[in-house]
Image: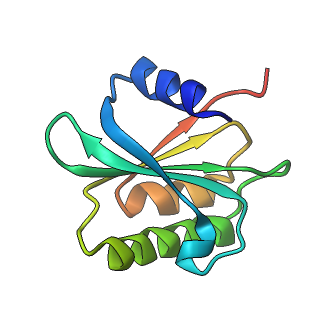
């Protein structure tokens, strides 16, 4: 998923983040295939957008890995990320979705079509 489509999907959900920059997962010590964007929303809070690059379902262990990546991103940047979004173009296990939402994530699912 390219930057333009990510920004348009966020805008469709009334989320506007300025100065989005791409963070390489290897900077966080991860080999996961995920696109990570970090920026500032219009309210002035730091936000992060995670877009998993998988062909299969997103499972609970993947959700736990994403939560850990968010924690590592906060440690790397030295500030707290207030709003975290997961944009998924794949199926998400209900337990994984519940885990993410319990930890304050906003999950957006769309079909592959």
The C terminus: image quadrant: top right
| Residue plotted at (60% across, 60% down) | 96
Looking at this rendering, what residue extends furthest in the left direction? 43
37 and 66: which is toward the camera: 37
12 and 16: which is toward the camera: 16
83 and 2: which is toward the camera: 2
| Residue plotted at (34% across, 79% down) | 75
In the image, residue 90 lies at what x, y percent? Answer: 73, 41
Relative to 42, residue 95 above or below: below
Image mark count? 0
Quadrant assignment, res 79: bottom left
The N terminus: image quadrant: top right
Residue 107 lies left or right of residue 31; in this view the side is left
Relative to 75, residue 59 above or below: above
In the image, residue 33 lies at what x, y percent? Answer: 72, 60
Q: How is the image coloured?
A: rainbow
In the image, residue 6 lies at what x, y percent? Answer: 54, 31
In the image, residue 5 lies at what x, y percent? Answer: 59, 25
Residue 43 lies left or right of residue 25; in this view the side is left
Residue 109 lies left or right of residue 77; in this view the side is right
Relative to 4, residue 31 above or below: below
Residue 42 lies left or right of residue 77; in this view the side is left
Relative to 70, residue 13 above or below: above
| Residue plotted at (39% across, 42% down) | 20
């Amino acid at each position: 998923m390219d930057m333009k489509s990510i920004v348009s999907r966020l805008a469709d959900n009334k989320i506007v983040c300025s100065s989005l920059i791409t963070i390489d997962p290897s900077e966080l010590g991860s080999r996961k295939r995920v696109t990570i964007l970090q920026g500032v929303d219009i309210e002035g809070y730091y936000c992060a957008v995670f877009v998993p690059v998988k062909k299969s379902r997103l499972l609970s262990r993947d959700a736990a890995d994403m939560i850990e990546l968010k924690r590592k991103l906060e440690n790397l940047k030295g500030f707290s990320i207030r709003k975290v979004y997961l944009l998924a173009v794949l199926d998400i296990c209900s337990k994984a979705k519940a885990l993410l939402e319990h930890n304050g994530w906003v999950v957006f699912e769309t079909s592959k079509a």
